[in-house]
């Protein structure tokens, strides 16, 4: 019995493996459900498209391998699986179902279900209750929504049979797969389209251009829904496409880019292997023919004509010429050259990289008189040549370029642009140095006149003959001042003075021995008091402004005046230096602080020049190492004056000088006028206005008490002179006469002069007091120059004397009347002349008392 059970288990495992292999092979066979139960086998209902047994505890199945995974694993699971009481089939459902009723998927059944309604079927997993429903009584599964295989190709569900009353599982939970079966509902698409491609022009037939690829979202493993065939809709007969691979190739040979450089193709991809009812998609392919060098350069004309002036500067562009190349880019690049030798040295041609033009450039100056026409053969050649197209012909072309030179009026040309001349610095004025020459290069051959650019000869050392061009000296030359003269010579056409040629003349001044040698520097020679005989105290050298050809050679010796010198001697070192040596020792500063040593220096010129230079030797007090401590003269205290005596004498001299300067300054200050003449002319004048005074109001112009206070003013120089003092001082005892110009009016009555009684405080006559006041002011001005007197105009109201008409004032008329009390008589007014005619008419006939007016005395102080 045990052997029989073991053999039965092996048979079940083998059968399960065969079912799995059939399912992976895609063969739609039906494997009857396998049942394991204590009572043996049983019948099972198949699914909609087939059924197979499944393990109740197997993991989620791989859809590519079937619901059980690997065959070996399935066999092992069958061998190890516990007994089960129910089985179901694998299910398939068609996508995009459009029916009105739910789509039947399959049926689940357990052998534990006796049909009495005690078993309930439960469905869980992907889409359970939302997409798939199960009849809990019968186990029928339906799809309630449209399914899209491209969105999800399969669903993994789990099923379980439970007791309806207690919900206790009667079957263990197990998984199964619902596959969505594909239909042709997606057209092919080109994910990389539209395409851009290029192919060289003139390519041979069948040259690959580009490969297109279309994708179909349908299931490629089921039917022909995803099998695509390519075809060309637009673009024939130039291109073709391979139906299966999508490779586009050229369909015509020798397509020319210069004729047409771009093509737009329309490619179609159709599924169902192109059969009727298949879906299709299209894309565009833009094919551009790339350029190859299949065209040589060509000139538009075989000959070109250009005209230039002979004055065209070097490096200027003469002409531009271009060859046309139908190619583009590097294939159109070309090089130009002058093929003949006629103009190769005079002209050059280069390529303009931007425009690919040949630029003809002038290399040398043109001369109409020498040659006026040039014919250049220009060749243009492609820079990059494709050897596969050499059979087309040579990739170059030539053209003739004729250059005509026009004549212009040119300035004179010097035979030698730079002339070198020499002259001796002792040359006399008018000495000829050399001759320059220029000519007119034009055919007219105009006469030439020469002149020197004076900006190069500011001091006018030289002259040039206008006609002959001979250069001569105009002044004496000095090589030591200027050894080389750089002159610019003008050559001017006589017919056209605007045409001016320029030449350079370098005049070198040759040296003569005209400068005597002198000391190289100002030597400071020191000798110590403790110097020994034969000691070198100075080494001297000389310089000479001249520059002999063989260099300087100087000879040193003591001048004849120092031949008997017992202090120093001179030794010529024969190397343009000489040494000064002491002939004795025991020098004393007190005896002689400085010695003058005349040195004779002779040069080697012809004739030789010499000079005597005095070398000053100072005697110094030196230390033990013969380092000078102090030099120069010292004061002799034994026979001379002491330092204190000298200082005292010097102080006395300075004091006397100061006193003399003060005396001279005071005398000059006293002699200076108080006011400048110009100011005196303006201010020190008497101004008369010819109008009558104000009568009694004139007394208010100035208080006469001020004039009585002379002593106070003398005593207190700080007291103000324009303020009346409280107590008038006593009158001065002495008066000085001072010339003062005063205009004083006088009063008269009855033809007799009557003076008004003076006030009680007046002790001096008015004119004397006034004169004393003016004198005091002038004295202050002379003594104190820092406080000049007041510049003011004052009117003093007091009666003066000396007026012919006496006083005409009406002041104190009653007291100044006649002694008999009668009225005044003014008949005498008619005798004074025409100036008093008006007064005579007013007072002479009326018999009224005469009135007098005070004459104001105007004085500048």
Image: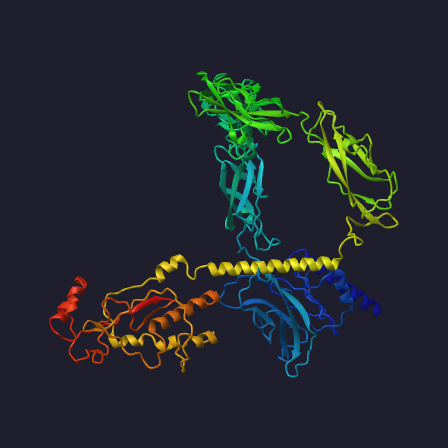
Left or right: residue 734 compared with residue 8: left
Residue lying furthest left = 845
Is 763 left, or right, of 80 in this rendering?
left
The N terminus - image quarter: bottom right
Q: Residue at x 86, y 47 (%)?
A: 626
Where residue 440 appears, as percent x and y from the top left, is 48, 18
- The residue closer to the viewer here, 169 or 296, is 296
Q: Residue at x 50, y 63 (%)?
A: 98
Hey, which quadrant is residue 70 in on the image? Answer: bottom right
Q: Residue 400, image x and y in percent?
A: 49, 20
What residue do we see at 73% from left, 40% from top? 522
Q: Nearer the viewer, residue 471 or 588?
A: 588
Residue sitting at the far front:
820
* Lateral position of residue 798 relative to residue 229, left or right: left
Percent x, y of residue 15: 74, 62
Q: Measured from the top left, where is residue 141 in percent x and y?
A: 59, 70
């Amino acid at each position: 019995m045990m052997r029989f059970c073991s053999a039965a288990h092996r048979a079940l495992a083998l059968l399960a493996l065969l079912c799995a292999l059939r399912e992976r092979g895609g063969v739609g066979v039906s494997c009857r459900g396998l049942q394991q139960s204590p009572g043996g086998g049983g019948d099972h209902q198949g699914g909609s498209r087939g059924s197979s047994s499944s393990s109740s505890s197997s993991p989620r199945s791989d859809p590519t391998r079937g619901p059980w995974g690997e065959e070996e694993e399935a066999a092992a699971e069958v061998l190890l699986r516990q007994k089960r009481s129910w089985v179901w089939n694998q299910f398939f459902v068609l996508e995009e179902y459009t029916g009105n009723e739910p789509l039947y998927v399959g049926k689940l059944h357990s052998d534990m279900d006796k049909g009495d309604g005690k078993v309930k079927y439960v469905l869980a997993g992907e889409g359970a209750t939302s997409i798939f429903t199960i009849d809990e009584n019968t186990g029928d599964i339906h799809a309630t929504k449209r399914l899209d295989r491209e969105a999800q190709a399969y669903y993994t569900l789990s099923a379980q049979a439970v007791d309806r009353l207690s919900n206790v599982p009667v079957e263990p939970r197990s998984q199964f797969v619902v596959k969505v079966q594909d239909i042709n509902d997606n057209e092919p698409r080109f994910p990389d389209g539209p395409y851009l491609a290029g192919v060289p022009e003139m390519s041979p037939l069948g040259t690959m251009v580009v490969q297109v690829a279309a994708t179909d979202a349908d299931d490629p493993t089921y039917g022909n829904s995803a099998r695509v065939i390519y075809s060309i809709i637009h673009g024939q007969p130039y291109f073709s496409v391979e139906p299966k691979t999508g490779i586009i190739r050229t369909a015509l040979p020798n397509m020319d880019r210069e004729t047409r450089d771009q093509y737009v193709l329309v490619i179609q991809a159709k599924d169902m292997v192109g059969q009727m009812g298949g879906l299709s998609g299209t894309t565009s392919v833009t094919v551009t023919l790339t350029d190859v060098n299949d065209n040589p350069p060509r000139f538009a004309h075989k000959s070109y004509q250009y005209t230039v002036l002979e004055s065209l500067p070097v490096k200027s562009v003469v002409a531009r010429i271009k060859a046309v190349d139908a190619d583009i880019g590097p294939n159109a690049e070309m090089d130009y050259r002058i093929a003949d030798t006629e103009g190769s040295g005079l002209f050059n041609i280069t390529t303009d990289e931007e425009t690919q033009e040949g630029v003809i450039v002038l290399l040398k100056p043109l001369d109409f008189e020498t040659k006026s026409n040039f014919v250049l053969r220009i060749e243009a050649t492609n820079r990059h040549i494709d050897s596969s197209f050499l059979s087309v012909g040579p990739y170059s072309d030539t053209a003739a370029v004729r250059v005509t030179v026009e004549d212009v009026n040119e300035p004179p040309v010097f035979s030698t642009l730079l002339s070198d001349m020499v002259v001796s610095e002792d040359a006399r004025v008018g000495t000829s140095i050399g001759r320059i020459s220029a000519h007119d290069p034009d055919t007219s051959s105009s006469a030439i006149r020469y002149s020197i650019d004076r900006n190069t000869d500011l001091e006018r050392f030289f002259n040039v003959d206008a006609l002959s061009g001979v250069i001569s000296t105009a002044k004496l030359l000095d090589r030591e001042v200027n050894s080389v003269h750089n002159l610019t010579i003008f050559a001017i056409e006589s017919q056209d003075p605007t045409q001016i040629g320029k030449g350079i003349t370098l005049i070198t001044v040759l040296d003569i021995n005209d400068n005597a040698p002198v000391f190289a520097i100002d030597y400071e020679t020191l000798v110590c008091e403790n110097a020994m005989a034969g000691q070198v105290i100075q080494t001297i050298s000389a310089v000479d402004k001249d520059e002999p050809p063989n260099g300087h050679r100087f000879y040193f010796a003591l001048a004849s005046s120092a031949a008997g010198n017992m202090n120093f001697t001179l030794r010529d070192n024969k190397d343009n230096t000489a040494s000064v040596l002491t002939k004795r020792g025991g020098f004393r500063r007190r005896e002689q602080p400085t010695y003058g040593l005349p040195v004779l220096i002779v040069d080697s010129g012809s004739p030789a020049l010499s000079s005597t230079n005095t070398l000053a030797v100072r005697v110094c007090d030196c230390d033990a190492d013969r380092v000078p401590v102090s030099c120069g003269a010292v004061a002799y205290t034994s026979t001379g004056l002491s330092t204190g005596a000298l200082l005292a004498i010097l102080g006395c001299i300075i004091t006397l000088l100061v006193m003399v300067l003060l005396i001279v300054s005071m005398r000059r200050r006293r002699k200076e006028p108080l006011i400048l003449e110009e100011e005196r002319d303006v201010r020190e004048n008497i101004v008369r206005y010819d109008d009558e005074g104000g009568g009694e109001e004139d007394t208010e112009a100035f208080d006469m008490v001020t004039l009585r206070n002379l002593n106070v003013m003398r005593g207190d120089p700080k007291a103000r002179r324009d303020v009346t003092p409280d107590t008038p001082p006593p009158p001065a005892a002495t008066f000085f006469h001072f010339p003062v110009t005063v205009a004083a009016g006088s009063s008269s009555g009855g033809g007799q002069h009557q003076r008004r009684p003076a006030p009680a405080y007046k002790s001096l006559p008015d004119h004397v007091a006034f004169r004393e006041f003016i004198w005091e002011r002038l004295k202050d001005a002379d003594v104190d120059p820092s406080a000049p007197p007041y510049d003011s105009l004052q009117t003093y109201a007091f009666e003066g004397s000396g007026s012919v008409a006496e006083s005409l004032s009406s002041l104190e008329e009653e007291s100044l009347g006649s002694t008999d009390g009668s009225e005044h008589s003014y008949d005498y007014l008619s005798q004074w002349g025409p100036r008093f005619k008006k007064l005579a008419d007013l007072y002479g006939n009326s018999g009224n008392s005469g009135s007098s007016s005070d004459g104001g005395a105007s004085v500048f102080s």
